[in-house]
Image: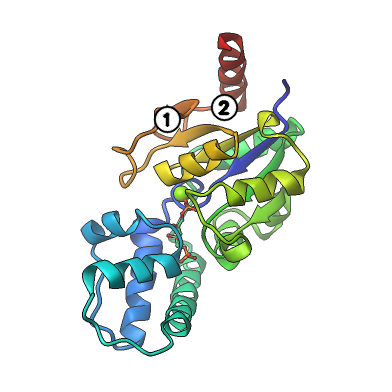
Amino acid sequence: MPLKALIFDVDGTLADTERDGHRPAFNAAFADFQLDWHWSVELYADLLSVTGGKERIRYYLDKYRPSATLPADLNAFIAQLHQAKTRHYGDLLASGKIPLRPGVERLLREARAAGIQLAIATTTTLDNVTGLLRHSLSAESIGWFAVIAAGDLVPAKKPAPDIYHYVLQKLALNADDCLAIEDSENGLLSATAAGLRTLITLNDYTRSQDFSAALLVLDHLGNFHLTDLLQSLTADLQQL
Ligand code: XBP
Ligand code: MG
């Protein structure tokens, strides 16, 4: 079976965005709202068990601030906080301090040259995806992706398969013809539940998670070429 599309996760996969990107942006938003909340690097490891920034704030409140006095319309308050966080995150991206991970740009270019479509399936906000591509690659690279599926587009975020189902439907491709590239167990669960084989690139927050269902687990894509990927897929098919 020829590989027809690569579907990339964003946070942790295209770039190491969590520890020094999303986390400080959440903290800056909390400061804007005069909240004495601070998400340390260690605490954030637990908070990452929940995908989606708004969902993560709610999880933090439930688990770590159960007796906080909160506005009556908590959904609206969380949405405002999250908008402020997205502005701070955009500023961080624009400062150019969040590069793509090793080998990502090369794999994107090799796939394009081979006629393999590119897509994105992410939990984060669309503005964050386009901002990352614009500042870490080029404005033009946004157009390399046939589908960018992001954020609240689907009701249930990863580990639910909804975002991958959405991408497959938009691409009009079967899961068998595509490969997902992820960095986290929640991402792997999401992609696998949509029937996709998945390549994992580890990072410090996800290294100890369970990736037994993955096709391949790599530290990064630094030495990894499209030809290596195609070989792994062929070997996988021969085992069936
Ligand atoms: C990414 C996330 C996101 C970001 C924050 O998960 O969990 O929530 O941390 O993004 P994945 P927003 O890599 O599995 O898609 O604040 O924009 O939601
Ligand atoms: Mg991720």
Residue at image position (58%, 44%) is: 8
- How far across and how far down the image is residue 71, in percent? 36, 89
Report the front residue among 61 and 13: 61
User: What amino acid is labelled 2 in the image?
Assistant: His
Residue at image position (33%, 66%) is: 59
Q: Mark 2 points at which residue?
A: 225
Q: Which of marks 1 and 2 is in front?
A: 1
- How far across and how far down the image is residue 89, in percent? 46, 70
Q: Name the residue under label 1.
A: 218
Mark 1 residue CB less than 8 A from any atom of ligand 2: no
Instruction: Label 2, secondary structure: give it.
Output: loop
Report the front residue among 54 and 129: 54
User: What amino acid is labelled 1 in the image?
Assistant: Leu
Report the front residue among 131 and 2: 2
Q: Is residue 118 shown left or right of residue 26? A: right
Q: Is residue 204 shown left or right of residue 138? A: left
Q: Image quarter for residue 197? A: top right
